[in-house]
Image (cartoon, coloured by chain):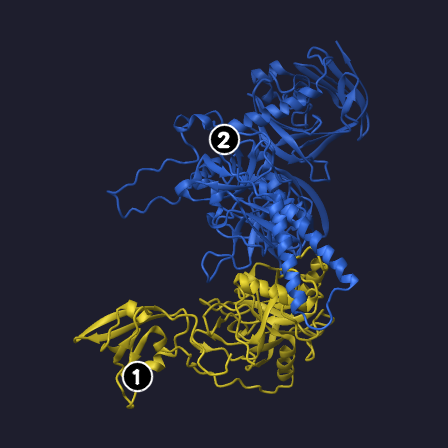
Chain colours: A blue, B yellow
Amino acid sequence: MQRIPKLNITKKQVTRIVIVLVISLLTSEGPVAFSAGNNDKLSDVLSAQQERIRVIEAAAKTSVSVFAGSSGGGSGVLISPDGYALTNFHVVQPAGITMRCGLNDGELYEAVLVGLDPTGDLAVIKLLGKDAFPYAPIGDSDTVSVGDTCYTIGNPFLLATNLQPSVSAGIVSGVHRYQFPAGTLLEYADCLQVDAAINPGNSGGGLFNASGELIGINGRASFEKRGRINVGAGYAISANQVQNFLGILKSGHLADHATLGATVATSADGRVVVSDILESSDTWRKGLRIDDEIIELAGRSVRSVNAFKNILGTLPAGWRIPVVFRRAGRPSEIFIELAGVHTPAMLNELMAGRRAPPSQSKPDNKPEPKPNPLAPDPADLPESIRKFYEPRFGYANFYFNRIELERVRDVLQRRKSASEQQETSWQYQGQLEAGGSFEIELGDQSATISLPTGISRWEQAAADAGLSAEAGFDSSPPGSGGMLAALTMWRRLLIQGAHNIEGRITYWGQQPLYSASTNQLADVLELTTSSCRARFFIDEFGNISQVTFFLGASSTSCDLHFDGLGKRGPYWQPTHLTVDYDGDRFATFHFEKGEQTK
Amino acid sequence: MTTRTQHATSACSRILRLVISLTVSGLALYPIPVLGGDITAVSVDAASRVVKLYGAGGIRGLESYQTGILVSSSGHILTVLSTAIDSEAIDCVLDDGRRYTASLVGADLHRELAVLKIEDINLPYFKISADSPRQAIGTRVLALSNLFGVAVGDERVSIQHGVVAAHVPLRARRGSHEAAYRGDVYILDCTTNNPGSPGGCLINWQGDCIGMLGKELRSAENATWLSYAIPTNELALGLEAILSERNDQPPVNERRASNFDIRSLGLELVPDLLNLTPPFVEAIVPDTQAAEAGLRTDDLIVAVGNRTVTSQRGLRHELSYLIPGDPIQLNIIRNGRIVLIDLGVVPSVTEPRGKGEK
């Protein structure tokens, strides 16, 4: 074992300081500079030094040295005791599905690819062989300020052949920086700029703040006339961007970044206005038009085109975010679903690292298409890795989707009580915000709603038969986009805990809740059946507080938001429920009474 | 006593610096950004007085952007004189995103400084004073600049940390031309000679402007890129000269003869008795660069690189343009045939020659 003995370092450092102090005493002329006040300073200096040593020692344990043989290597950082680690896409891409990772405990561990984000240059890998890895706590990168102390820890120039990472100290030189992508790849949006050294090989390693929290993933630097060595300007992907993608990456996805389907420009008077917009985009459908001024995106103010790109560049495709815009002096807020920058097929190509087709100058000498190291045939993998890898289109490694799905199922399962019976139906009544009363009855195979405008009913059998779509029956009550169907599925998931649910269920990733003002993210499960597609937002307590429901292949959704959701006796009841269809409010329901009947 | 440029990179000099900083500033250990003041507040405040400048250029090696320091509330901006600001319209962007068109007020050719002006009032600025004290070696500093043009719009310029490593006269070159300014500069231990950095602001941890980051230059002695700043008291002289429309002329800016002596490579030429003594090799010292390259007695040097030489004086002239790190290739005539001799590069350490010179 090659651990760094803690005591030795400390002793060495202290000895050095003492020597230096002695020399300084000997060489200083005139009155000796140590008054009582300076002694206080001395102890401050020494304790700050001790603190720094402690922080770096802890952080260095989480640093991963990635070795990929002839393909090079890089760095990584552990973020959970079960071995999940972050690194760069550009480190993993040449390495392939499996790589060897060294920690400063002197051991080499096998690691397997979990998830990839080619656009954001991020990847999640999992180190195998232990369930108590040291790991770095993830900090809030939005609280990082210019001037803050920071440390980069990693494997620059692949020096860590003894598995001891290199550490560099510096300050944060800039925050919310934007570094242009190459094509659509490796875009560093809203990133941190530091003067701690980031060199080739540091890629994928951690950027830590003074208290040892992980605030970024190092991956880029400005190089110029001195070749590829650091000249005081390096960049790290912000920890908050990492958090946005973490749920998606840990569940084995091939992640995509977001586009509004609209471009913006600075107007003559300095406002950020829509300069072009795709009429096929959700943004258009929700009402955004050319020349509208963008004021806020995802809760952050947009004061420049750079700020717009910074915010958008940190968001995953598929998230629903609020956009505040101003037209003719009047602000309005819309919720839009972010489209992907790429198609799944394009992403697959990017993952494989396939560039433009080879030049046609040598038609006789056609190179064999290289096997994609990121999508190997499982049969070619070593035994130890094979069981952790499952290829599937749209995923980097579907094995880990099953793991995450299982985790959420367990959360749901824990909330389930024995009294929840499939056969018993849940009945609610209350007042509509717009006036009048309502009654809802939710059963296993059917649901009924009574509104001042009339009674509507939904039946599983009818939906399965495919009859209802034409009759508008499936989307009942009329104008809701499928509220009853969505409620029935919500109930089914609560009762059955995602087990034995009809249709294909996958773990989508994490998203912020519609109502949440905080950055808290909820797990999202996606259910696809023959007649619909739905996303369920599940908080850490197992509350399904939000459902997004798409009927058939439709791209317009019925959105259910439950507030004050809790157990009222043996069934679940919110204090109120809002239902939106295609961004417009259908109704707000205030619940008064609920019961379950046989 | 003259001081030579120090490139304090070795462990030895680092410790030396530590000692110096300890004796000078009491108890400064390097680097302890955790302690000793709020860098964030100081940097953010200073950044409001630093502007991003965009002008002409963009040709290889000549950037189209740099940095400037606001030096009056009415919009005077001090920066370095460069091709970037040799432009009809110079765009100037403040840290709050305010955008102006700046005009050139004047230039100080001696110090290679320029003053620009934007039209506004009540702007934050640094007072550039002629009695600004010299900063001690070991002083911890922050460099604010538009490096690599990373910051745009309302983004703050980039901030780097370092210490003053030396206080020495500048001996620098751009290509084979000596830089005009030869006064004192602070040598910094952080890399500040990046594209966009020239004109940047150097502050101490109290937030005083103590200097301005200079142009991208190499040391005349060893060709390494210099990270340096012109001290504020010198800036004040330049500023005053420009505003009073006085012309501080630069010293004659010629291709300077370096002190490189071909004998340091291990060869002797025949005695230089005539105006046109041919550069015949008289002797080769064994185990030297010349010996290793295969140079022999009686070889006649006819060219340095692709420039022919016909005399020893001509040879010395050509060699005077070489600075440490430059490759040296000689064409010689041996037995009636031209042979190419590769002597490697000019060594970075040349022997001090003058007696009593340090």
Q: How many marks?
A: 2
Above or below, B91 against A362 in this view is below
Q: Left or right: where does residue B179 sit relative to residue A194?
A: left
Q: Left or right: where does residue A183 sit relative to residue B36?
A: left
Place residue A281 in its image quadrant: top right
Type of the residue with mark 1: Gln
What kind of element bears circle 1?
helix
- In the image as oriented, which residue stretches furthest toward the left? B336
What kind of element bears circle 2?
loop
Place of residue A434 in the rendered image (x, y in percent of width and height, measured from the top left):
80, 31
Front: mark 2 or 1: 1
State the CA–CA distance, disc 2 to disc 1. 72 Å
Nearer the observer, A468 or B322: B322
Place of residue B40 in the rendered image (x, y in percent of width and height, measured from the top left):
70, 58
Above or below, B173 against A403 in this view is below
Nearer the observer, B354 or B196: B354
Please report the residue visible at 55 percent of the width from the left and 28 percent of the height from the top: A401
Q: Left or right: where does residue A124 sit relative to residue A592?
A: left
